[in-house]
Image: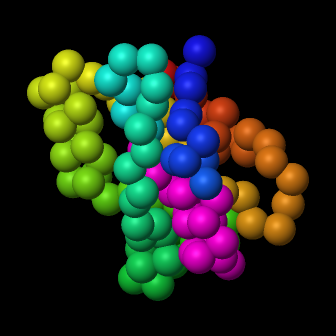
Amino acid sequence: MLRIARSDMKEIYAQALKEYPAECCGVLTEHGSVSAIHVCENIQQAMHDKDRKSFPRDARTAYIIAPKVLSGIAAEAESSGGRVSGYYHSHIDCPAYFSEEDERRTWIF
């Protein structure tokens, strides 16, 4: 079972409020029984602004974490005996649900 400290949940909530109206995002790593959060920058808007054809969705409806950031977090976790245990992101002005893209990404786990 995925466990996240209450203080980290509060940090995710604060991040979501701060980054609104863009989606916030981050990575969860596990070292033992509780996952730690790694707040990440959502680069979706920059990618969308640069290439709207390849990235038709903006940061209100999607997120991208820079690949170098993702690999760095994963490498750091693994080098200390941990692992990536999940990802989080907010959905803007709608209920919480697994989008079609969220469902497609479940293969990562």
Res 11 quadrant in image? bottom right
Tell me what residue is drawn at x 55 percent, y 48 percent: 7
Residue nearer the viewer, 103 or 94: 94
Q: Is residue 38 above or below residue 36?
A: below
Q: Tell whether position 77 is magenta.
A: no
Residue 57 visible in the displayed image: no
Q: Is residue 36 above or below residue 46?
A: above
Q: Is residue 53 above or below residue 62?
A: below
Q: Position of residue 72 (x, y in %)?
A: 19, 46
Tell me what residue is drawn at x 59 percent, y 15 percent: 1
Residue nearer the viewer, 9 or 88: 9
Q: Position of residue 37 (x, y in %)?
A: 43, 45
Q: Tell whether position 21 is magenta.
A: yes
Res 77 quadrant in image? top left
Is residue 108 left or right of 93 when viewed as pictured?
Answer: left
Coloring scheme used:
rainbow
Which residue reaches farthest left? 79
Q: Position of residue 32 (x, y in %)?
A: 37, 17
Tell me what residue is drawn at x 46 percent, y 66 percent: 42
Which residue reaches farthest front? 7
Is residue 38 left or right of 8 when viewed as pictured?
Answer: left
Residue 66 visible in the displayed image: yes
Q: Is residue 60 above or below residue 37?
A: below
Residue bounds of the magenta highlight: 11-27
Residue nearer the viewer, 77 or 60: 77
Is residue 107 left or right of 21 when viewed as pictured?
Answer: left
Q: Position of residue 24 (x, y in %)?
A: 56, 63
Which residue reaches farthest bottom? 49
Res 105 quadrant in image? top right
Tell me what residue is drawn at x 56 percent, y 26 percent: 3
